[in-house]
Amino acid sequence: MNPALLTLDPLELASPAGLAVLVPLAAAGLLALIRPWRIAARANIAAAGASFALACLLPWQVGHVGGLLLVDHLSAYLALLTAFVGLTSAVYSHAFIPVEIAARRLDRRRLRLYHAMFQVFLGCMLLALLSNNLGVTWVAMEGATIAAVLVVGLPRTAEAIEASWKFFLICGVGIALALFGTVVLYLAALPALGPGLPAMSWSALGPAAARCNGTVLNLAFVFLLIGYGTKAGLAPLHAWMPDSHAEGPTPVSAVMAGSILNVALSVILRLRGVMAANPTAIAPGPPIMALGLASVLMAAFSLWPRRDAKRFFAFSTIEQSGLTAFAFGLGGQAGVFAGLLHMTFHTLTKAAIFQCVGRAAQLKAGQRFDQIGGLISSHRLLGLTLAAGIAALVALPPFGLFSSAFLILTETARRDPLLVAPLGVGLLVGAWALVWRLQTLCLGPATPDRGHAPAHLSLAPAWLHLGIVLVLGLAMPAGLAAWLLAAAASR
Amino acid sequence: MTGGQIVFGALSYDVAHLLGGAMLVLSFLLLYQRRLSAVINIYAVQALVLAAAAAWQGWVQGSWHLYLTAAIALFAKAIAIPLSLRRIVRQLAIHRAVEIALGVFPTMILGVALGALAILVVLPTTLAAQALTREDLAIALSIVLLGQLMMITRRNALTQVIGFLSLENGLSLAAVGVEGMPLVVELSVAFLVLVAFIVFGVFFYRIRERFDSLDVRHLDQVGEGLR
């Protein structure tokens, strides 16, 4: 498409992609008004379901390029994944809330804010993924951050306030650097595309990348990498993540663990494509790989001293995010394919684990490791689900993460054999910590139950997630593999 | 003066440079203030200069939407936010003196080093760009870095937020200095700053309610046993 034809057309929002974004945002307005929380929790599921149904149409919309939205293989796929996790988390949230109310950790008045912000977060994430304009992506990311900050601070404990303040400040600084990078990227694209909308649009930047100013592009790359790297939880700007994942309500931890990282990593991936296509710019792979590897190593060793279960799994999220970034940094169709696969499996697995841990924390009225133990003997289904989730996260076969981690390692061995050593050490140390915690959480004598028992159905989303990870690990449908390869092409 | 062509030494260049430089000086002033009211005042003046810089760019580049940016900077950042900050200070009866984590002299040295860093990073990489854009960008980056320095060296949640807001002024300066930046971006950014500010305000009350102070050292101490 001719870049000059890119204009802002409000009618674009009436397309399935636009509606998938608008539905949650509109639902947020309604949910802010619904007082009875039982109805609000169901409306929350309905809105997330509608958004997911619209996202299911996205694969047929590939090729839509507008001033505001861009539906290609990558964005359609990630939006579908995000909407799916949003839906299952909304279902989980429905069973989660009554227990939190009974335990007086959330009060009814604040639930309106909780439901509204859940949908704002979901809508902003979808907009950030589907947006064609880097500026709009930035705004959506910031909007999602503010929504998440408000939800994390909801319990009003000292820890929750600390977590949300840290979240806000660190992400504020990160996102500010990203905006500076956005301005510089626009400046780099000016010679190629001229002033106006195209110089900020991915669809126009891609083909024109070779004509952009290479040195200015380098500057933009550094700022955008650090800025979006903060959001992806990459070291050294990861500090917000363990706190906010640990203190926020669990359904939000589950959505956040997948979506914010995925959006940030997809921006880094697109940027990588632009940089790689420019002959005078630096090679984008090594810096991304360095950040990814540093995150893997830092997180793997940080897993050991953790005493809080949700904080522990947040560090594991940093590790997996680092591994995905490493794969994107490696590049090539195989590297990016492995990264996308890993991102998918991790999103599904981690959401399932957070749902199990959240349920266990409700049962035991605490989320410290010394409060949760022996789940299999006392709560067989929950213990087994959590054990399966952690086994999947350790990348044991037959779960999907085994194949994606294996692909990343073999691709590293083929391209940079020396890097296999540190990466392998990081993954092993991390896996060891996970296995140890699997033993203390799920095996051994049971700790006493002090809290209220949630409804049994709250485990259903976790089973669905782990089932998908298992099936895709055993037999990847050819259609999905082809789709991911198409998304990985030309990055 | 017609759109776009900015020649070195021309009036348009000098004025834009002067306004950008003034914003940078104000950023330095923010670094060593001892009183909260002075910090808020200087922030308001910086926002005022930003409004002037945006309006000047609007005239030079001949694009009407920069006037809108200028109006937003004037009414939201230079008037509304400082007024409500004052109200918060009054309502919460915060100590009027600023608590500093790092002395004035080392802070200033660091500030100068950050300014030099910004110039060293931006100027060589943007040689091909127009002189004005290039130097505006260097100044804007210095303001961004100084805002971050302020966030690090202050202990009070309120002054940390002013550091953040001043950092955002630097970002706006960068955005208005680049020709033809799409309006949608600036508008949304302005909107978000307002939303973010409201959220910050909510937090002041929550932190205050919980800890009886806005000193963020209290925040670092909680939850230590949980890590």
Image (spheres, coloured by chain):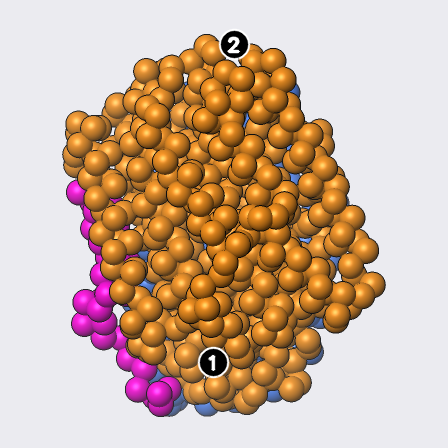
The residue tagged 1 is A205
Q: How many marks?
A: 2
Q: Which residue is mark 2?
A: A448
- Mark closer to the observer (1, 2): 2
Q: Going by the image, does A162 lie left or right of B106?
A: left
Residue A269 on image: x %, y %: 54, 67
Q: Position of residue A55 (x, y in %)?
A: 30, 60
Q: Which chain corresponds to the colour orange?
A: A
Q: What range of the chain is rendered magenta?
A: A1-30
Rendered location of residue A311, percent (x, y): 58, 32
Looking at this view, is B203 or A144 the one in front?
A144
Depicted B74 relative to depicted A450: above or below: below
Chain letter of the residue beneath label 1 in the structure image? A
Which part of the image, by quadrant, shows the C terminus of chain B?
top right
* Kind of residue sitting beneath label 2: Pro
> Does the rendering let one see residue B119?
no
